[in-house]
Every structure is written in C-alpha cells, then in structure tokens.
Image: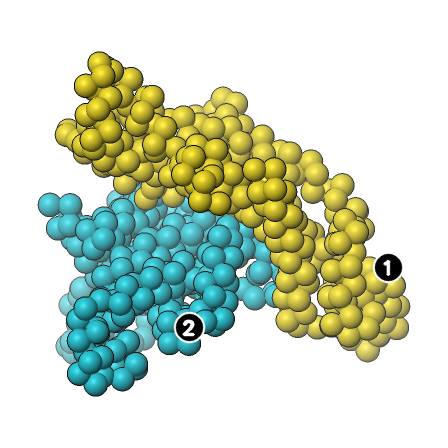
C-alpha cells in the first residue's frame, strides 16, 4: 500500500509539472512576442505609435530581462519546465509578485469552501441515497430532486444563496455541494437497491440483522469502493466550480486569481493555476484509488 | 411522461431560439403603410416606425416588440426597471428589455449546446475509430490521452486557456467545452466499438467476407450509437450550464450578445434584480433538465 501511495503522489507531481509546461506551450500560441505580452500585462506599455517606439522598446526589453523571456519559444518552455522542477513558479507579469506567495492564500481560501462542500456532498448524498434505497416512492422522489439539482446552474443557486445573507463561506459550500450530493445520492441509492436484492442482503437478514444494519454495515461497505472515484470526480468539479461561488459571494480564492490573471494575460499565474488543477485532479484520482483498495480487499489482492 | 415533458421543453426552447427574431424584436412581422402591405419589411423599426404610422396604417408586431440590444423604449432610458406593461420582465442595467434578451439568449445557449455536442461527438467518433482501427500503442495512447483530458476541470480549463492563448468568443468556448467531453465520450465509444467487434454477429459478418472498415462502420458503429446519443445529450446539458457559468464569470459570451448567463451576472452585480435572475435561472434549469432526462432515457 505504501508503494501505491508513493506512486500516486509521484504521478500527481508529474501531472502538475506537465500541466505547467503545457500552459507555457499554449501561451506561445498567443499573438505577439512573449516579452511584449508581459509588458502589456504589467499595464505600463504605451500604445504602439511612432512617438512611443523607444519607450515601448525599453519597457519590452525590461520585461524580457525581468521575466527571463529571451530566446525562442522552445527555450522559454524548457526554462519554465526547469524552474517548475525546482518549485520556482516565477513572478506575476502583472505586478511582479511572487506567484507562489499569491496562490498560497488563494488555494487556502478556495479549500475552505471546497473541502466542507465535498464533505457535505458525501454525507448528504450517502444519507439521502441510503434512506431512499428500497425502490418505491421515496426513491423516485430522490431521483427527481437529484435530476433538478444537477440541472440547476450553480450561479443561480449562488445568487439566491447570496441574497439570503448569513455566513458567505457556509452558504457557498452549501451551494457548491448541491449538484454533487444529488449525483452521489442517486449512485448510493442504486448501489444499495442492487445490494438489497442480492443474496448477501438475504444472508445478513437470515443472520438476524435489522433493515438499518443491513444497509449501514453491509450495504454501505459494498457501495464505498464505487463511491471513491465519484468523490474524486466531485473534487475535480468543485475545483472548477468554486470560481462561480467565489464571484457570487464576493469571496477571495483560486477562481478570482485565475479570472484576474486571464483578464491580464498573466501567463506565470495561469500556468501555476493549471499546475494546481492538474496536480490536484491526479491527487484526487490517486486518493480514490487508494481508498477503494482500502475498502475492497479484492482490489488489494488483484494488485 | 418525463420523456414527453423533456421533448416538449426542448421543442419550445429550440423553436424560440430558431424564431427569436419573430418572437422578440422591433421589426414588424407585417406592415400596412400607405395602402401597401409588406411582410417582414425593411426600413424604420420600433419607436421610429411607430412615430410615422398614421391612423390608416397598422403593423403586426412580434409578441415581444422590443429589440434585445435597444437601450431606449419610447425615447426614454429605464435601467433596472421592474416588470411593467411596457417591459414584461423588466429591463437590465442598460435599459434593455429582459424578455427580449431572454428569448435571444436561448439562441446563444442552444447554439453553444448544439455546437459542443456535435464537436464532442465528432471528436469522440474520430478518436474511437482511430484507437480501435489502429490498436496496440495507438489505442493505448488514445486511452491515456482521453483519461487525462477528460479529468480536467472544465471551467478552470476554459478560463486558463482563454487567458493563455488570448482567444475570446463563442467558438473558443464551444471548442474548449467540447474537447474534454469529446475525450470522455471517446472512452465510451471505444468500449462500445470493441464490444461490438467481439460480438457473434460481427464474427458472422467477418466470416462472410466483410473488411475491417465495413465491420466498424456497418456493424460496430450502430451498436455504439445509443451510448453516443446519451453522451451527446449530456454534453449539451453540460454546455448549457457551463455557458451560464462562464458568462456569469465574464469569460463566456461577449457583450452585447444576449445570454442567459449574462442575466445572472447582472443579477449579482445589481443586488438581485429578481426579474433578471428568475427567468434566466428557470430557462437554464429547464433546458438542462430536459437534456439530462433524454440522456437518462437513452441510457
């Protein structure tokens, strides 16, 4: 198991590095030389006309030296990759601030919303799914509510939540958890309904287990391995959608940093956001894999 | 029952999107002026036309006789006005008619949904056919690439790529939404094609002399079609929701393009003008629900 965990951690680090390098490669497709774009992102580049040519040239040269943007595209991408391997994310093109110093608090702020949302989604989803497990009216009601929750735009829910007032972070977590909780509820309900119709449930009942124990002890344990990849995809969904609730509730976080960087064309910050996203998704997937192995001995034996 | 309701919702939304100019606009459908009757006439529109109509003239206007981009009604600017007889769903922050923008926003949302679904399905089919036809290392490479691309968080990816490449507008949004969904769909299509190629009826066709291309296109592809249709409906629903989120964040449809997400963004900016948020939210939810309901039925 230790080897599996180390392998997954290495894969997450590699995914983060690859996403960072890919982002720099994509940035080379943008129009204009990199140094000129860096100077423009800083907001100091005057309009391109004859009178401003010397000033523009000086500012572009300064940006090129400051952000290490000399040479061809391949050289810039290679240097970016080498810096990332040394955990040096560089400085923002917009204001020269250290990218790692900017992203640290932003990631913490987003995690303060996304982690409670993930926990809420898992608890509420599993609870709802378990209560509606026997097929019937309650199951149909849960399915219908889940279908509506998945189809409701998070931005709309966030607007309604923001108007209700109260603690912004809690309301943001609730809004963010709605759709994943619905998906998890449907998954758990279906898995438990299948379990209840299986010989394993019959055997547990024959040994004298009550309905609640059959579901909670025997059924949920069987549903857990299937829940692990769903939790990983939920975490990836939350990572992207957190930007929406941050905007609606006027909260700081990764989404706001990414939007500001995208508006300014701030490549070092966007590349770092891509690295965080790539690494986080790989980490979630690896964690789901480890959790599934822990919950299901058959997976451990197969490995 | 659910399928019928879903089909009805989608039919209404598609009808409104296709006929948006006939449902909401300041150009008369029929104009009788100076003894002559014109259908869908050129020339003056809206308040300018109303001002020159005499007692003998008449015009048949669209049900919502407002242009989605016009900021003046009857010569006056009325920003953020609540619903009234003149503006059934009120006005937005520039005085534009919300009902007209809602109708024309359907065109934006559904165009993105249809474009993303078509592009994702085409990409998925191409990748799946390539992987199954080539096999070996190509198959493995396609599978890994699809796993990686499909796992990317869509909203964050669109924001980052738009900022990195400097591409704005609806076409990049459609492409960026279609690529991860296409990768996800390609996994389904690949599995479907491989299962069909191993089925007895395909073996029978092979024994009868059918080539690999014919086996794939005539025998395996129809087997994968239901999964592809389901995935296309999910992609369209995802695209409707993503368009709303991206425009809400300011990186989707560019102003002054009417969009449902833009109405939600305005509702946030102006302390919840309910007439901005409510109709747009209901429209997005209804269309996304209908698409997901169809997908569930197809599955």
Q: Residue at x 42, y 76 (%)?
A: B134
**SS assignment at label 1:** helix
Residue B259: x and y, percent?
A: 40, 55
The residue sitting at 83% across, 69% down in the picture is A70
Outermost front residue: A301
Pointer 2 indicates a residue of which chain?
B
Residue at position x 24%, y 29% from top? A200
Q: Colour of chain A?
A: yellow
Is residue B74 in sight in this rendering? no
**Label 1 crowd (10 A; few <14 / some 14-19 / many >=20):** some
In the image, the chain rendered in cyan is B
Is A233 left or right of A263, judged from the image as shown? left
Q: Secondary structure at mark 2?
A: loop
Say which residue appears at 64% left-offset and 71% top-offset: A29
Left or right of A20 in this view: B143: left
Q: Nearer the viewer, residue B136 or A28?
A: B136
Query: According to the image, label 2 marks what residue?
Result: B135
Badge count:
2
CA distance separating discs 2 and 1: 48 Å
Evaluate if marks 2 and 1 touch, with contact meaning CB atoms under 8 Å apart. no
Q: Position of residue A234 (x, y in %)?
A: 45, 41
- Tag of residue A66: 1
């Amino acid at each position: 198991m230790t080897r599996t965990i180390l392998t997954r951690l290495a894969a997450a680090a590699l995914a983060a590095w690859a996403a960072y390098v890919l982002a720099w490669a994509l940035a080379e497709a943008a129009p204009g030389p990199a140094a000129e774009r860096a100077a423009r992102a800083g907001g100091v580049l005057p309009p391109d006309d004859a009178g401003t040519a010397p000033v523009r040239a000086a500012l572009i040269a300064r940006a090129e030296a400051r952000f290490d943007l000399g040479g061809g595209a391949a050289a810039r991408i290679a240097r970016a990759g080498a810096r990332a391997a040394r955990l040096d994310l560089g400085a923002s093109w917009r204001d020269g601030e250290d990218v790692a110093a900017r992203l640290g608090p932003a990631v913490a702020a987003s995690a303060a919303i996304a982690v409670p949302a993930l926990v809420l989604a898992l608890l509420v989803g599993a609870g709802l799914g378990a209560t509606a497990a026997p097929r019937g009216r309650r199951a149909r009601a849960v399915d219908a509510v889940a279908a509506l929750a998945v189809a409701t735009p998070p931005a709309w829910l966030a607007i309604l939540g923001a108007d209700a007032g109260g603690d912004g972070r809690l309301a943001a977590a609730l809004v963010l958890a709605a759709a994943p909780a619905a998906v998890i509820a449907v998954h758990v309900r279906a898995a438990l309904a299948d379990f209840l119709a299986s010989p394993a449930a019959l055997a547990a009942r024959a040994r004298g287990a009550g309905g609640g124990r059959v579901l909670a002890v025997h059924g949920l344990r069987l549903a857990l391995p299937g829940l692990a990849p769903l939790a990983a995809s939920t975490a990836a969904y939350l990572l992207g959608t957190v930007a929406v609730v941050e905007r609606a509730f006027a909260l700081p976080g990764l989404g706001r940093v990414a939007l500001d960087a995208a508006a300014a064309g701030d490549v070092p910050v966007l590349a770092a956001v891509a690295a965080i996203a790539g690494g986080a998704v790989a980490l979630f997937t690896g964690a789901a894999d480890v959790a599934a192995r822990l919950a299901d001995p058959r997976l451990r034996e197969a490995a | 029952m659910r399928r019928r309701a879903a089909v009805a919702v989608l039919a209404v939304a598609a009808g409104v999107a296709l006929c948006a100019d006939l449902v909401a606009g300041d150009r008369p459908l029929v104009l009788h002026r100076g003894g002559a009757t014109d259908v869908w006439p050129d020339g003056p529109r809206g308040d300018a036309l109303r001002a020159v109509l005499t007692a003998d003239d008449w015009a048949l206007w669209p049900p919502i006789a407002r242009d989605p981009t016009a900021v003046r009604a009857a010569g006056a600017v009325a920003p953020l006005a609540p619903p009234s007889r003149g503006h059934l769903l009120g006005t937005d922050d520039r005085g534009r008619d919300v009902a007209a923008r809602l109708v024309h926003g359907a065109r934006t949302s559904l165009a993105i949904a249809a474009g993303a679904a078509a592009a994702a399905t085409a990409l998925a089919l191409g990748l799946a056919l390539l992987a199954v036809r080539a096999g070996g290392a190509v198959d493995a490479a396609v599978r890994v690439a699809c796993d990686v691309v499909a796992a990317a968080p869509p909203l964050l990816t669109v924001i980052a790529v738009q900022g990195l490449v400097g591409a704005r507008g609806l076409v990049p949004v459609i492409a960026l939404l279609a690529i991860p969904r296409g990768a996800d769909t390609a996994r389904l299509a690949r599995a479907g094609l491989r299962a069909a190629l191993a089925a007895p009826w395909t073996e029978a066709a092979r024994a009868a002399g059918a080539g690999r291309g014919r086996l794939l296109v005539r025998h395996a592809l129809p087997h994968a079609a239901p999964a592809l249709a389901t995935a296309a409906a999910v992609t369209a629903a995802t695209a409707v929701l993503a368009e709303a989120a991206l425009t809400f964040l300011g990186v989707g449809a560019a102003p002054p393009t009417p969009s449902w997400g833009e109405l939600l963004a305005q509702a946030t900016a102006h302390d919840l003008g309910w007439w901005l948020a409510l109709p747009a939210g209901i429209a997005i939810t209804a269309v996304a629900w209908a698409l997901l309901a169809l997908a569930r039925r197809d599955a």
